[in-house]
Image (cartoon, grey):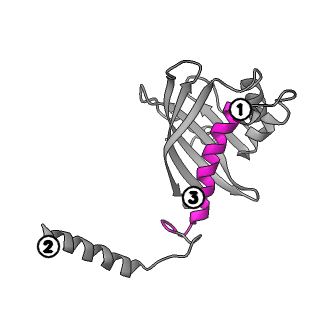
Amino acid sequence: MKKYLIAIVIGFLAGLACTGSMPAGEAVESAQLTNDDYVEIERLYAKYAHSIDGLHMVGEEEDYMEGRGDAYADLFSEDGQIFVEGIHKAPIRGRDALVEFAERHLENGPAVRRHVITNFVVTPNEDGTAKGESYLMLVDMSTNPPVLMSNRATADTFVKTPDGWRFQWRNNSLISNNTEFIPNAEQLESGTYQ
């Protein structure tokens, strides 16, 4: 057993010697994404949950909707779109539609349901975009204990804009019945979805 552990440690140290170390901000998994890119995309997931749940509105007395739809749409690229299986009949596409969706969703104040996004994996695409995959749970916090309302998977495409990484395409699928992801609007229009 002792020889086995020593062999593992030696193999690990040899691996480190071969790879060398990288300074902060350098690429780890790919030459296309840096550590900073990964962190920024991770924060974008968190900002999404806070924005759609209206958590930033807590404690404000008046005009709580002022700019809230814009704050949500700011998380997307100008051509950004989202589709939620079982909620939307077609993707919500473009800034104006995203603002309207968020304002309608938050018109009664902060949501009692919370989006919990976990287990996300981000990988670079050849075209400079990034692919994101995660689990998304919608939890009703108005009950004690809280109740799981929806269990989903997301397939996301991120694009780097002058303002940083943004969602270009959010696609939510129901895990409970293995609903397939739908193609984005461009794929539908061009017939390239397979």
User: Is residue 92 shown above or below 187?
Assistant: above
The total of numbered circles placed on residues is 3
Spot occupied by residue 90 in the image (x, y as percentages of width and height) = 64, 28
Instruction: Tell me which numbered mark, 1 or 2, is placed earlier along the sequence.
Output: 2
Spot occupied by residue 71 in the image (x, y as percentages of width and height) = 77, 40
Q: Answer left or right for 121 relative to 10.
A: right
Identified at 60% across, 45% down, the residue is: 45
Q: What residue is disc 2 on?
A: 3
Cα distance between the residues tagged 3 and 1: 24 Å
The residue type indicated by label 1 comes to: Gly
Callout 1: 10 Å neighbours few (<14), some, many (20+)?
Answer: many
Callout 2: 10 Å neighbours few (<14), some, many (20+)?
Answer: few
Instruction: State the image quarter where residue 12 is shown.
Output: bottom left
User: Is residue 72 shown above or below 41?
Assistant: above
Identified at 41% across, 78% down, the residue is: 19
Instruction: Tell me which numbered mark, 3 or 1, is placed earlier along the sequence.
Output: 3
Identified at 48% across, 65% down, the residue is: 29
Could you say whether the residue bearing mark 3 is in a helix, strand or loop? helix
Image quarter in which the N terminus is found: bottom left
Q: Are marks 2 and 3 in contact (CB under 8 Å)?
A: no
Q: Which of 99 and 148 is in front in this view?
A: 148
The residue type indicated by label 3 comes to: Tyr
Instruction: Tell me which numbered mark, 2 or 3, is placed earlier along the sequence.
Output: 2
Instruction: State the image quarter where residue 83 is shown.
Output: top right
Instruction: State the image quarter where residue 141 is shown.
Output: top right
The residue type indicated by label 2 comes to: Lys
Q: Give the range drawn in magenta.
A: 28-55
Q: Does the magenta stretch include residue 125?
A: no
Q: What residue is disc 1 on?
A: 54
Identified at 55% across, 76% down, the residue is: 23
Q: What residue is disc 3 on?
A: 38
Spot occupied by residue 189 in the image (x, y as percentages of width and height) = 64, 38
